[in-house]
Amino acid sequence: MSATTLTSPLARALPRPRGLVWTVLRLHRTALWIWTAYVILTTGLLLWLYGPGATHTQHLLDTFGYAGVQEDAWTVGFVGIVGSPFSTAYNDLFQDPASLLNIGSFAVAVFAGGSLIARELESGTARLAWTQSVTPARWLAAKLAVPALLITVGTGLLVVLYRLLWSAHSNLLLAGIGPRALYFSVGPATVAAPLFGLAVGVLAGLVLRRTLPALAVAGLAQSAVIAFRANSWPFQGSHQQPELSVRSRAITSTGAEIPDPGCYESRACLARHDVVRFTREYLPSPDYWPRQLLETGVLLGATAVLVALAFGVLRRTSTS
């Protein structure tokens, strides 16, 4: 009786990038690893703030009060000790990812202006690629599409996590510190900003064709965008975002609620009013979505214009 050998079907190979996509990923693999590490580390910080950090902070708030208790206790938030040397810890960490998102946006523009475009034009490798069955338009399309996809996925993930964190634990922010900058700086426009930086960097690289000048111009342009987003519409005064409406109450040692006296760092004022805790509720701002949609539309529209200009400059560059 002959034995029959059964062979299992071969596992399907995972799709791998090819052609220009693989070339871009391979050529800029260092930047790819840096971006991946940035997204992972920022995600880790957001998840820590969402889970263990918030749990620990809430435990401290439930454990300590103001009247005559450990001044060096690590107590954070708007309900609990005010004036502790460590009272801003969670609040500062809560806002750090927003700063990281701005840094990431700036880094994208600098990378696009220097390494992605200008260095290849300066060294001549771009023209070499154009002579090997790769048209300049396809070359530039790949240079734009691959980073744009990675930027959108990475930044979009961070924005979603940040919005979840805000919804779950914005109540742990320190009393007296308005979250307006944070509230208005995280949203769809936060994804559009680095895409604009990518387009700025690409155009600067194509126009200047030198790494350092293109890097500098792209960095300055993106810095201006970040500064504008921090102080933009709707205006109050010269450089102030609208404060979010709040319901704020103070709680005395007897548990009674009284109007917020507005003194968060003065122990003498808190003792005079017998305040041991605060409760503060930030109300949804009607300006949030109009502002986000306006900013997103402006940034994406400007990005489209810059991309069109980049292809126009490339056409002249490749034929000269």
Image (cartoon, grey):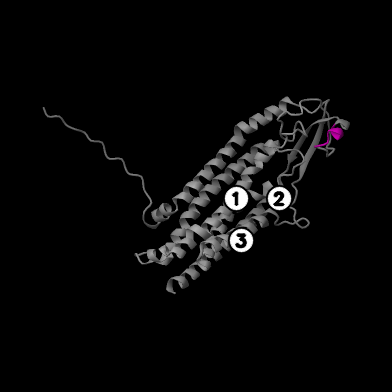
Secondary structure under the numbered disc 1 in the rendered image: helix
Q: Name the residue located 59 percent from the left edge and 58 percent from the top edge.
A: 219
* Magenta: main secondary structure: helix
Quadrant of image for the N terminus: top left
Residue 53 — which label? none
Quadrant of image for the C terminus: bottom left
Q: Is residue 243 left or right of residue 134?
A: right
Q: Estimate how packed mark 1 is, as few (under 14), some (14 to 19) or many (20 or more) residues with alpha carbons within 10 Å.
A: some
Q: Which residue is mark 2?
A: 286
The number of discs equals 3
Residue at the far right in the pictured view: 272
The three-letter amino acid code for the residue at tag 2 is: Pro
The image quarter containing residue 93 is: top right
| Circle nearer the N terminus (3, 2) | 3
Q: Which residues are magenta?
A: 265-270
The three-letter amino acid code for the residue at tag 3 is: Ala
Residue 221 — which label? 3
* Front: mark 1 or 2: 1
Q: Name the residue located 40 percent from the left edge and 66 percent from the top edge.
A: 127
Secondary structure under the numbered disc 2 in the rendered image: loop
Secondary structure under the numbered disc 3 in the rendered image: helix
Q: Position of residue 24 (x, y in %)?
A: 42, 55
Q: Which residue is mark 1?
A: 103
Residue at the far bottom in the pictured view: 320
